[in-house]
Amino acid sequence: MSTKTEPYLPSPNEPFMNERQQQYFRQKLIRWKEEIIRESKETLLTLQKENINHADLADRASSESERSIELRSRDRQRKLIAKIDSALSRIDDGTYGYCEDTNEPIGINRLVARPIATLSIEAQERHERREKVYRDE
């Protein structure tokens, strides 16, 4: 008879940012970063292989458009890696999981969904309302 253990998932019912939760988020962030890097390497290889001269102008334009979209996507992922590295640093210094505005816990469910979050839902909503006001002026 084998017993199958369920994978650990942080719970709001345990002490916030205990060692087990910190380890969970560290591993989640590291895996996410490794996946982004792997995808980036695959993209670079694909772009290098596709560096073919297209005789047809429409094919060339299509290829350039696809390349531009891919490079913008990679730039967003580069910025995401910086946010992941920042989150890993916050785990190391003990500030991970706490809102930058209020220093209150962000909340386990939000961190599971968005492990790079730096604001609680309430602080994020206030931030977005302020942004909207400035955009609308």
Image (tube, rainbow, N blue to C red):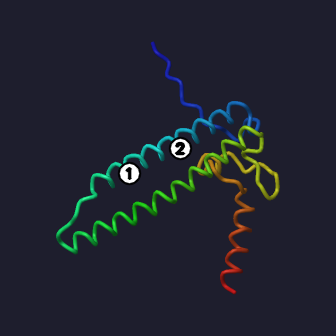
Q: Secondary structure at mark 2?
A: helix
Outermost residue, left direction? Answer: 55
Q: Is residue 113 above or below residue 24?
A: below
Q: Alpha-carbon neighbours of circle 2 within 10 Å: few (<14), some, or many (≥20)?
A: many
Residue wearing tag 2? 33
Q: Residue at x 73, y 74 (%)?
A: 130
Residue type highlighted by circle 1: Leu
Between disc 2 and disc 1, the foreground one is: 1
Residue at the limit of the structure toward the bottom, as seen here: 137
Q: So how many labels did they put on this image? A: 2
> What amino acid is labelled 2 in the image?
Lys
Residue ID for mark 1 = 44
* 80 horizontally vs 117: left or right: left
Q: Earlier in the sequence, mark 2 or mark 1?
A: 2
* Res. 114 mark: none
Q: What residue do we see at 70% from left, 59% from top?
A: 121
Secondary structure category for the residue under label 1 = helix
Which quarter of the figure is the C terminus placed in? bottom right
